[in-house]
Amino acid sequence: MSEEKTPGAATARPGRRTPLVIAAVAIVAALGITAAVGLGDDDKPSGSGSAVAEISGGTDSTKAATVLDRPFTKPALVLTDTKGQKYDLRERTKGKPTLIYFGYTHCPDVCPLTMSNIAIAKKKLPKADQDKLQVVFVTTDPERDTSAELAKWLPAAGDPSFTGLTGDFSAIQAGARQIGIGIDPPTKDKDGNVVSMHGAQVIAFSPTTDQGYVLYGEDASVDDYAKDLPKIIKGENP
């Protein structure tokens, strides 16, 4: 069966997978050297990520979560939320367990799957813990992902409580770099389809220090998040 393409939309390629950043990081860590994170959606390095993550030599690479020796500082991002209001990421999530993910609403696979997995895992938590957890989705395609578009997409792909942010691409790209995630400006391929390359990591930030100690790759499952979230909410590492 041939694929039907919509001009201006990202092509949905069945079975396409974003490169698993966590695997590369774990392999390099096993060799005792520093790993740079940030890969794109089309199986090529993004080249935009400049931050460096160091992984403990004692990390169990079979776990979905990778604990960083040097945690990330929360990005200094001031963007616009789904209500069209100014949103200061550091200020609004201060002292709260927070998961941050960079993606886009026209993503055919990894982005909606990641949001769905986190949403399902969140619903398994006690109500009090659900209320504490902050999940922030920052678009890598702000030209198409307006506040209104994010407001429609997030409840369907994830959860109505998730925060969606849009704004100036250069500011978003700089914020992503601060936590080792490479993203490139959306471009059109020869067929006129918009392609957005971005790292697929989810970074978990502690409520006690506001530092990002835990990294998840695209293959993290509902069960992985359900197992780890209670600890993350308490400020503990998985």
Image (tube, helix red, strand yellow):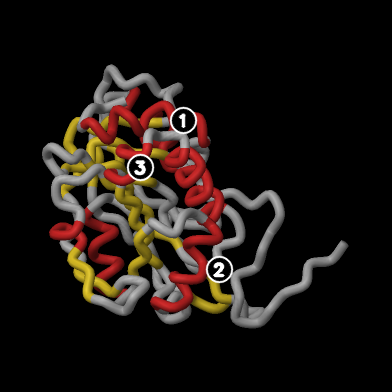
Residue drawn at x 59%, y 49% is: 17
Residue drawn at x 51%, y 42% is: 120
Disc nearer the start of the sequence (3/2):
2
Amino acid type assigned to the residue bearing label 3 in the image? Gln
Give the quarter of the image for residue 210.
Answer: top left
Residue projecting furthest to the front:
127
**Label 3 with label 2: CB-CB less than 8 Å:** no
Residue drawn at x 32%, y 47% is: 99
CA neighbours of label 1 inside 10 A, class few (<14), some (14 to 19), many (20+) = some
Disc nearer the start of the sequence (1/3):
3
Amino acid type assigned to the residue bearing label 2 in the image? His
Residue drawn at x 26%, y 77% is: 85
Question: Residue 211, position in %: x, y?
Answer: 17, 42
Whether residue 185 sits left or right of residue 35 in the image: it is right
CA neighbours of label 3 inside 10 A, class few (<14), some (14 to 19), many (20+) = some
Q: Secondary structure at mark 3?
A: helix
Question: Residue 127, position in %: x, y?
Answer: 36, 39
Question: Residue 57, position in %: x, y?
Answer: 27, 20
Q: Disc 2 marks which residue?
A: 106
The tag on residue 33 is: none
Q: Is residue 15 at least partly visible in the picture?
A: yes
Q: Disc 3 marks which residue?
A: 130
Q: Is residue 36 at least partly visible in the picture?
A: no
State which quarter of the image contains the C terminus: top left
Q: CA distance from mark 3 to mark 2?
A: 27 Å
Disc nearer the start of the sequence (2/1):
2
Give the quarter of the image for residue 133.
Answer: top left
Q: Secondary structure at mark 1?
A: helix
The tag on residue 224 is: 1
CA neighbours of label 2 inside 10 A, class few (<14), some (14 to 19), many (20+) = many
Q: Nearer the viewer, residue 99 or 160?
A: 160
